[in-house]
Image (cartoon, rainbow, N blue to C red):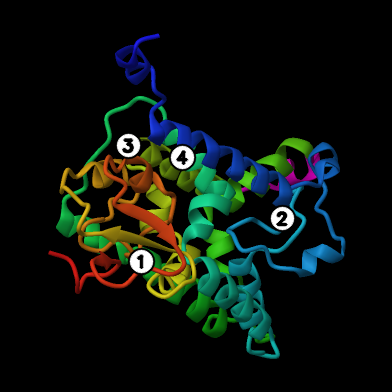
Amino acid sequence: MSRMHRDRVKPDPVKRQGRLRTLIQLGFAVLFNGYLAGFRGGKIFTGKTKAVCVPVLNCYSCPGALGACPIGALQNVLGGADRRVPFYVLGTLMLFGVLLGRLVCGFLCPFGLIQDLLAKIPVKKINIPKKADKILRGLKYALLVLFVVLFPVFLVNEYGVGQPWFCKYICPAGTLEAGIPLLLTNDTLREAAGWLFSWKAMLLLLVLLFALWVPRFFCRYLCPLGAIYGLFNRFSLSRMALDKTKCVDCGKCESVCPMAVDVRKNINSTECIRCGKCKAACPVDAISRTPFPKPGPVSDNKKNAP
């Protein structure tokens, strides 16, 4: 086989990296939701591991879930009548934030996997104008502050107990992972389903439809857990680095980024999910995944951007 022919049939590095990441995502989806008997019987697993928070948005009520969702756990503790400080949940979030940042979103989250699979459907993607995009990205912080923290604490019943507002009224991951499977396998729940399930089903449908045209739509604009992990991106152990001496400003890194990160100016943006597509697309190997960025021309922040 000639060298020219070998070059023509050389696998696309972005696709190759994407396939590997999909396998990792599938592995973690199975790991976090491995109670298969729950899907068959329409019952929620209640074993000891349910007291442990997984690092991703993974509904407690999913029939297969072996652990607790940190966002759900955070709301339940904050909304409790005794008003305890959720030290365990906050510690879990800080641990994964410091170690991984939003790599959790890029490699471990089952709902992120669903969005990635939808993005593969060949429809024309929409480029959101920068000004509108910036405003929309703030929604996830508003949802975090209001629906995850303030509403459970201050909007309480006569017994002083709050509700898990985000889980109950917003979370599309919970509807997909828990609501739909439970209704399909449990006749009693199906008969009791009312306006709330219809509302959440509509939200889920909208999120999935938007994810066809805007990659990682939920992660970009609505996920409160992503908002938390994004705060750690600048100093988490897992980071990306850009070697300015190698970069040829071709823009290929930004063209493949599912989160529309301005890679050459702010590679460790709070929006970066560490998926590695930019690294795979770079034709000159200027991007690296490293816990210890090298000094000198290697940059991972806005200050050193051209």
Q: CA distance from mark 3 to mark 2?
A: 29 Å
Q: Are marks 3 and 2 in contact (CB under 8 Å)?
A: no
Q: Residue at x 44, y 50 (%)?
A: 275
Q: Are marks 4 and 1 in contact (CB under 8 Å)?
A: no
141 or 120, which lies in front? 120
The type of residue carrying mark 3 is Trp
Pick whichever of labels 1 and 3 is earlier in the sequence.
3
Write the start and end of the magenta stretch as one range.
186-196
Which residue in the protein does label 1 denote? 270
Q: CA distance from mark 4 to mark 2?
A: 23 Å
Q: Which mark is residue 213?
A: 3
The residue mark sitting in front, 4 or 2, is: 4
Mark 4 crowd level (few <14, some 14–19, many ≥20, 10 Å Cα): many
Residue 259 image position (x, y, % from top left) = 34, 51
Which residue in the protein does label 4 denote? 116
The residue mark sitting in front, 3 or 2, is: 3
Figure quadrant of the C terminus: bottom left
Residue 252 image position (x, y, % from top left) = 24, 41
Whether residue 157 appears in this view of the structure is no
The type of residue carrying mark 1 is Thr
Q: CA distance from mark 1 to mark 3?
A: 22 Å
Residue 34 image position (x, y, % from top left) = 77, 46
Check residue 188 for magenta coloring: yes
Q: Residue at x 33, y 16 (%)?
A: 3
Considering the numbered disc 1 on the image, is that residue within a helix, a strand or a loop?
Answer: loop
- Answer with the quarter of the image where residue 123 lies: top left
Mark 1 crowd level (few <14, some 14–19, many ≥20, 10 Å Cα): some
The type of residue carrying mark 4 is Asp
Reply above or below: 172 against 243: above
Pick whichever of labels 4 and 2 is earlier in the sequence.
2
128 or 293, which lies in front? 293
